[in-house]
Image: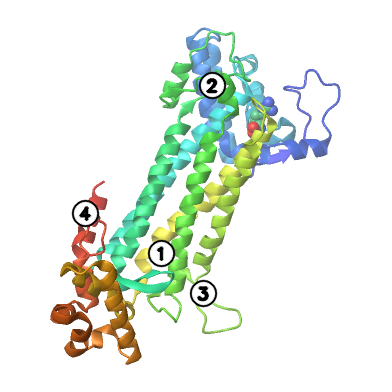
């Protein structure tokens, strides 16, 4: 059975009001329809708060026991779908507190001692995001494993590298894949840093100015596994930097997934023919029977727009907000939830897609030939003492002569070469293969199989 939402006037916090809220106002302002997702974390935070209240003597141990048992029961009710949500409760915090007072009576009414929803919601979102970012880091690890497994099979698969989407120099498929692994490694670091800034405990800030009651903030932090406390009560209730950090990390990770998607979409065209997408990940056309469309990858590209939009929306929400808590901050959650719901399946599906791709090394090899070796020739002339600018010009003339004769550099004879490269002609002739070119690019970070194997070994260390 689904938890039902209905509207019954609730008077938990309306002591000073004579009239109930207009139902349209209630519907518009309530966060309950979306912040219920926080219920487990709200309960976790409340249980830690209750234990602390008992430890410092603000409530009795017996009341703390009643509160915690009540919270556990509420968690079961919400999980089972039997909890009766009431829109008049505004948000998940008041919904749980109302039910707790029904279950535990006066003990329940003591839970909110030395606490405001302002520090409570900050804590809940931090606890929730901390768990979710840990999950995203695990998904990024799985994606890395999946990409590395393919890269390991293609260290010697020669393909053209592109600049301006024009064939530039030979690289390997492994090297191209590992470029994305580097991006996703930085994403993992970014999420880990955002996670670190999220794991800071705000309870005790109260509404904005702390409390006169003798609470023990560190005890709550310890119980929740947070090592640090917020150090300014005004900042604690108004800060959403951690959510913005998360949304930025998510947006940039989306940008990386989008670029990878675009590469695969291009490679899967008949024009490139570098890769075949698996049937399980492709769709057909309603009209053209021959079509195999990369919809999933197109949507990865598009959904990145949502991620960027979420970041923008939160930044605009925060900009110009007066201190300290304002209801505007309630708008943080849907941006965060939407980013999570968007990014997590993208990461998961991208990891599942890679082992099922079929690459076409012959097509890649064929495309890597043409003209992509001119820089190698210029560098050979440099090795023999020619200034690079002069070598660039000489090879330019060579390329133009070859093109004029309808030939590729590789097809030129020793005699043709001697005219432009003099004594270097024989050495140059030996250079003119994409495999040789690749092998020689052994510089740290380069595409040579030896260099790529070195990086693969580093990346595979945990
Ligand atoms: N639903 C609110 C939010 O999401 C909780 C905090 C409300 N505090 C308040 N004073 N109205 O931010």
Cα–Cα gap, marks 3 and 2 = 51 Å
Position of 438 with respect to 20 (left or right) is left
Q: Residues within 10 Å of mark 1 (few under 14, many from 20)?
A: some
Cα–Cα gap, marks 3 and 4 = 35 Å
- Residue beneath disc 3: 293
Hey, which quadrant is residue 71 in on the image?
top right
Cα–Cα gap, marks 4 and 1 = 23 Å
Position of 92 with respect to 72 (left or right) is right
Position of residue 437 relative to residue 287, above or below, is above
Hey, which quadrant is residue 79 in on the image?
top right
- Residue beneath disc 1: 353
Q: Residues within 10 Å of mark 3 (few under 14, many from 20)?
A: some
At numbered mark 1, what does the secondary structure look like: helix, strand or loop? Answer: helix
Residue 321: image x %, image y %? 66, 32
Position of residue 143 relative to residue 15, above or below, is below
Cα–Cα gap, marks 2 and 4 = 45 Å
Badges 4 and 1: C-beta atoms under 8 Å apart? no
Q: Residues within 10 Å of mark 4 (few under 14, many from 20)?
A: few
At numbered mark 4, what does the secondary structure look like: helix, strand or loop? Answer: helix
Upstream in sequence: badge 3 or badge 2 = 2
Upstream in sequence: badge 3 or badge 4 = 3
Give the colouring mode of the picture.
Answer: rainbow
- Residue beneath disc 4: 457
Front residue (pair 47, 419)? 419
The numbered dot on residue 344 is none
- Residue beneath disc 2: 203
Residue 286 visible in image: yes
């Amino acid at each position: 059975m689904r938890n039902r939402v209905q509207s019954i006037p609730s008077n938990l916090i309306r002591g000073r009001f004579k009239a109930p809220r207009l139902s349209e106002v209630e519907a518009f302002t309530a966060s309950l329809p979306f912040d219920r997702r926080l219920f487990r974390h709200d309960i976790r935070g409340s249980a830690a708060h209750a234990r602390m209240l008992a430890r410092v003597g603000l409530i009795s141990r017996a009341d703390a026991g009643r509160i915690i048992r009540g919270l556990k029961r509420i968690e079961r009710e919400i999980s089972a779908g039997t909890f009766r949500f009431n829109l008049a409760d505004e948000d998940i915090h008041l919904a749980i507190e109302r039910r707790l007072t029904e279950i535990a009576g006066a003990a329940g009414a003591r839970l909110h001692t030395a606490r405001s929803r302002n520090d409570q919601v900050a804590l809940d979102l931090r606890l929730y995001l901390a768990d979710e970012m840990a999950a995203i880091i695990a998904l990024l690890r799985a994606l890395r494993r999946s990409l590395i497994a393919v890269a390991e099979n293609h260290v010697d698969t020669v393909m053209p590298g592109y600049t301006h989407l024009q064939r530039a120099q030979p690289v390997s498929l492994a090297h191209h894949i590992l470029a994305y692994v580097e991006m996703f490694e930085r994403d993992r670091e970014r999420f880990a840093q955002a996670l670190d800034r999220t794991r800071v405990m705000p309870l005790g800030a109260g509404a904005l100015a702390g409390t006169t009651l003798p609470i023990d903030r560190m005890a709550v932090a310890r119980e929740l596994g947070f090592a640090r406390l917020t150090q300014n009560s005004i900042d604690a209730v108004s800060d959403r930097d951690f959510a913005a950090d998360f949304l930025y990390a998510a947006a940039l990770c989306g940008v990386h997934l989008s670029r990878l998607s675009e590469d695969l979409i291009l490679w899967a065209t008949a024009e490139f023919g570098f890769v075949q997408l698996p049937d399980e990940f492709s769709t057909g056309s309603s009209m053209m029977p021959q079509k195999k469309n990369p919809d999933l990858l197109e949507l990865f590209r598009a959904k990145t727009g949502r991620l960027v939009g979420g970041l923008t929306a939160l930044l605009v929400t925060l900009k110009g907000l007066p201190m300290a808590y304002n209801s505007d901050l309630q708008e943080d959650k849907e941006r965060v939830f939407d980013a999570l719901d968007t990014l997590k399946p993208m990461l998961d599906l991208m990891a599942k897609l890679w082992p099922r791709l079929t690459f076409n090394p012959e097509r890649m090899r064929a495309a890597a030939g043409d003209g992509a070796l001119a820089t190698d020739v210029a560098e050979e002339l440099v090795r023999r003492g020619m200034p690079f600018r002069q070598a660039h010009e000489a090879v330019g003339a060579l390329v133009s002569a070859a093109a004029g004769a309808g030939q590729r550099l590789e097809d030129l004879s020793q005699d043709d070469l001697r005219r432009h490269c003099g004594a270097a002609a024989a050495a140059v002739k030996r250079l003119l293969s994409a495999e040789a070119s690749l092998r020689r690019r052994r510089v740290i970070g380069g595409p040579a199989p030896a260099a790529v194997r070195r990086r693969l070994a580093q990346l595979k260390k945990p």
